[in-house]
């Protein structure tokens, strides 16, 4: 009986959702006149090449127009990593006990074949390079800090599951992560002190389509890339270290 | 350097990113730095609240794009008041929990303090933002920290509470995102003032779907019935300072978000009646559930839900006096309920029996804490010399102005239920036979200071409410005057 009621309720919700969303013309061009913008979409499309000199207008939106949201999202990721670390905290994380328990942590149950190990070794630097490329060119091509960071974390994941004793240098990770986050906020504060508005872009923004264009946008995306990469790697590291008990 | 609302967010963020580094240099940094940051937030709150009450609304532009193009932070008398309240309570709860888990080793304290600080900062963000999607981001920040802190201890029930909260909270986020999406497709903007302006042109079906989604999503955050199944478990299993934060900070932010969306964004009639009905059902069921509880923290959790129900009723009545009473009650609820959680956790900490029975005869071991607990219990029920009296009084008066006699009877009946279970707890502390040995854990000095500050506030406001009614009055007018809000934000183009 309960099951049927649930099905009926879901059907009602689904039907009302479907009718509502059917009425929204997704994908249609509804942004209106670019020169006399009424909706934010039109304004962003007009301003990102003109004022910000940024070829990828999505990046302009993410990092500049709505940069505060992005700072919030970076914080969400940071807090998720912190929360995960606090929930999965093990006594062995303390320095003294770390050495003693190192042997017990078995990340990979079966040894990987030499084919996988060699392949991972060759792929790892290339993946890192791709990740760095993606976030450095975030203002020119599709992608950016979050995507680049995720690619970098994939590289580390490959190494972590291939090699039994591959360890990320925890100290370096913490420093990189914290400094990248602080640098993001510092860039925001630079805008606040120099131009009077938090995260405001510089006035010398460069030329459209150059590597150095968009003012502070590429700089912020590099910080985001580093932060996301180290954070996701940390999360993977924590998750993979869970002992089988 | 000019103080601006953006400091509310930037200071905690800087601290949160820096704490992992600072703990390497100075071991106690994780415990000290959040206190400094939260105290800084208290100072800027008072400066900004003064500024708002003298010169009017502050709209802080982010990234140099004027609203509606960019994100803006808005301090009206209403949001400035709530932000001040949340900052002050955040700081007091930090002070209370300063020695929390001092015995544990480095790692966990660091995580705990970062999460606790960001939960307060995120709630301030929810309150001060003027952008709908930005509000979503801050609700996410509050959510993530709240799930992690709920699951902080390692126990089966704790994990269950955390997981339950995570599932329901994610559901809330999904619905909130869908609602924002619908609003965005219809109005082409995310700025709340502009949405409010354009809401009249949105088709009715879209409006209602979005409204329902908002009610589901924010109803979960604001602990509205029947969406509050997560709350008792989360309150019970979380560390005590976190439970106090849930009551004093997170639920306030949730109620604020709900009220902001309903009062500013939508102009649908009937929502107010819905709020009254749901508020009343929330209150009634929560208070009846509270009386059946055997565990003190769970009882307090249900009482919290009941208080939120009363706040929703008052917002539902919608007259200026009722909104005034509602904001007053939010303040009282935040202050008194955190005091109850703070004192209550000392009883639980010291009792062998974690149930209410464990309270028996506690006043001999913990005389000061017992006195504060009783004071808070009387205050929350609404005894006259305490601040809790005034908020209930104003809400009842506003209800009688609207000729809602059944509502008045209902609220008074529920108050009797409330009275029963609080008096039962107080009675156990003072009159029940003692069944336990000497107390091992006396409250530390910082916790005593924190609890005393709250108690002083309850008495001072109770005896002399005029010190805050001016601010509350401005806050109520600011919330109700939608046209002024829109004009102030968009008018300065």
Image (spheres, grey):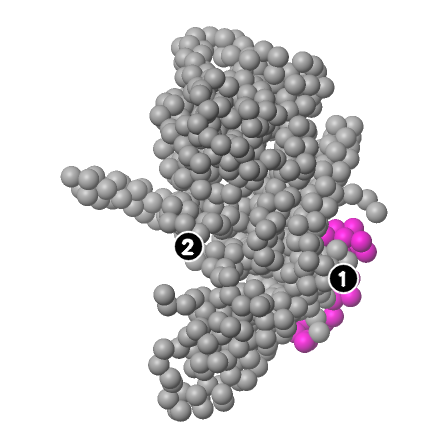
- Magenta stretch prevailing secondary structure: loop
Instruction: Determine whether, in the image, residue B411 is placed left or right of residue B127.
Output: left
Give the residues in magenta: A191-211
Instruction: Give x and y (percent) for residue B291.
Output: 38, 23
Q: Secondary structure at mark 2?
A: loop
Q: Name the residue at 58% across, 11% down.
A: B384
In this view, the residue farthest toward the front is B437
Q: Secondary structure at mark 1?
A: loop
Residue B70: say if magenta. Answer: no
Give the mark count: 2
From this view, report whether residue B91 is shown above or below residue B371.
Answer: below
| Picture residue at 44% right of the left edge, 27% below the top | B435
> Which chain does tag 1 point to?
A
> Pointer 2: what residue?
A26
**Rendered residue at 36%/44% (across/down):** A20
Q: Which residue is mark 1?
A: A202
Q: On what subunit does the disc labeled 2 rest? A: A
- Is B493 in front, or is B7? B7
- Front residue of B241/B138: it is B241
Q: Is residue B252 visible?
A: no
């Amino acid at each position: 009986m309960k099951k049927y009621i649930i099905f009926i309720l879901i059907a009602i919700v689904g039907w009302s959702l479907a009718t509502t969303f059917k009425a929204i013309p997704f994908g249609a061009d509804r942004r209106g006149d670019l020169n006399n913008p009424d909706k934010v979409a039109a304004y962003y499309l007009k301003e990102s090449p003109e004022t910000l000199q940024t070829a990828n207008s999505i990046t302009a939106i993410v990092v500049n127009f709505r940069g505060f949201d992005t700072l919030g999202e970076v914080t969400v990721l940071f807090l998720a990593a912190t929360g995960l670390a606090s929930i999965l905290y093990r006594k062995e994380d303390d320095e003294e006990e770390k050495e003693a328990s190192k042997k017990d942590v078995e990340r990979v149950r079966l040894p990987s074949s030499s084919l996988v190990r060699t392949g991972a070794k060759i792929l790892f630097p290339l993946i890192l390079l791709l990740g760095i490329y993606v976030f450095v060119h975030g203002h020119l091509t599709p992608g950016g800090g979050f995507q680049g960071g995720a690619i970098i974390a994939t590289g580390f994941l490959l190494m972590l599951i291939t090699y039994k004793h591959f360890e990320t240098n925890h100290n370096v990770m913490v420093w990189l992560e914290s400094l990248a986050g602080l640098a993001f906020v510092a860039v925001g504060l630079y805008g606040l002190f120099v131009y009077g508005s938090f995260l405001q872009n510089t006035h010398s923004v460069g030329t459209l389509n150059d590597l150095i264009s968009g003012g502070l946008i590429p700089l912020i995306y590099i910080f985001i890339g580093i932060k996301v990469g180290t954070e996701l790697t940390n999360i993977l590291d924590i998750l993979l270290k869970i002992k089988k008990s | 350097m000019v103080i601006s609302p953006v400091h509310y967010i930037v200071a905690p963020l800087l601290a949160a990113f820096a704490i992992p580094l600072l703990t390497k240099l100075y071991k106690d940094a994780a415990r000290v730095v959040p206190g400094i940051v939260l105290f800084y937030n208290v100072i800027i709150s008072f400066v900004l609240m003064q500024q708002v009450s003298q010169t009017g609304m502050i709209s802080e532009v982010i990234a140099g794009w004027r609203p509606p193009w960019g994100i803006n932070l808005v301090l009206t008398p209403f949001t400035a008041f709530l932000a001040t309240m949340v900052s002050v309570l955040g700081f007091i709860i930090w002070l209370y929990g300063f020695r929390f888990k001092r015995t544990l080793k480095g790692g966990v304290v660091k995580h705990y303090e970062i999460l606790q600080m960001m939960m307060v900062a995120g709630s301030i963000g929810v309150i001060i933002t003027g952008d709908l999607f930005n509000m979503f981001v801050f609700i996410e920040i509050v959510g993530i920290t709240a799930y992690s802190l709920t699951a902080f201890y390692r126990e089966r029930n704790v994990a269950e509470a955390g997981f339950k909260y995570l599932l329901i909270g994610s559901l809330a986020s999904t619905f909130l995102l869908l609602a924002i999406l619908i609003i965005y497709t219809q109005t082409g903007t995310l700025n709340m003032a502009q949405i409010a302006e354009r809401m009249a042109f949105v088709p009715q079906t879209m409006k209602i779907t979005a409204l329902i989604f908002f009610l589901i999503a924010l109803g979960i955050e604001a602990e509205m019935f029947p969406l509050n199944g997560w709350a008792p478990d989360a309150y019970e299993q979380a560390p005590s300072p976190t439970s106090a934060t849930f009551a004093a900070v997170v639920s306030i932010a949730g109620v604020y978000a709900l009220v902001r969306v309903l009062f500013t964004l939508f102009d649908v009639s009937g929502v107010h009646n819905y709020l009254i009905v749901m508020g009343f059902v929330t209150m009634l069921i929560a208070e009846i559930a509270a009386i059946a509880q055997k565990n003190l923290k769970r009882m307090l959790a249900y009482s919290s839900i009941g208080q939120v129900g009363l706040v929703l009723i008052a917002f539902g009545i919608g007259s200026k006096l009722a909104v005034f009473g509602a904001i007053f009650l939010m303040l009282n609820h935040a202050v008194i309920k955190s005091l109850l959680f703070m004192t209550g956790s000392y009883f639980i900490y010291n009792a062998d029996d974690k149930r209410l029975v464990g309270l028996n005869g506690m006043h001999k071991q913990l005389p000061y804490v017992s006195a504060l607990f009783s004071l808070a219990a009387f205050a929350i029920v609404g005894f006259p010399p305490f601040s809790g009296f005034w908020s209930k009084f104003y809400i009842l008066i506003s209800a009688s102005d609207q000729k809602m006699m059944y509502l008045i009877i209902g609220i008074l009946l529920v108050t009797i239920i409330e009275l029963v279970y609080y008096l039962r707890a107080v009675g156990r502390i003072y009159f029940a036979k003692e069944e336990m040995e000497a107390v091992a854990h006396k409250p530390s000095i910082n916790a005593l200071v924190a609890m005393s500050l709250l108690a002083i506030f309850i008495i001072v406001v109770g005896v002399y409410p005029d010190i805050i009614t001016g601010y509350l009055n401005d806050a109520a007018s600011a919330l109700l005057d939608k046209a002024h809000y829109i004009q102030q934000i968009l008018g300065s183009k």
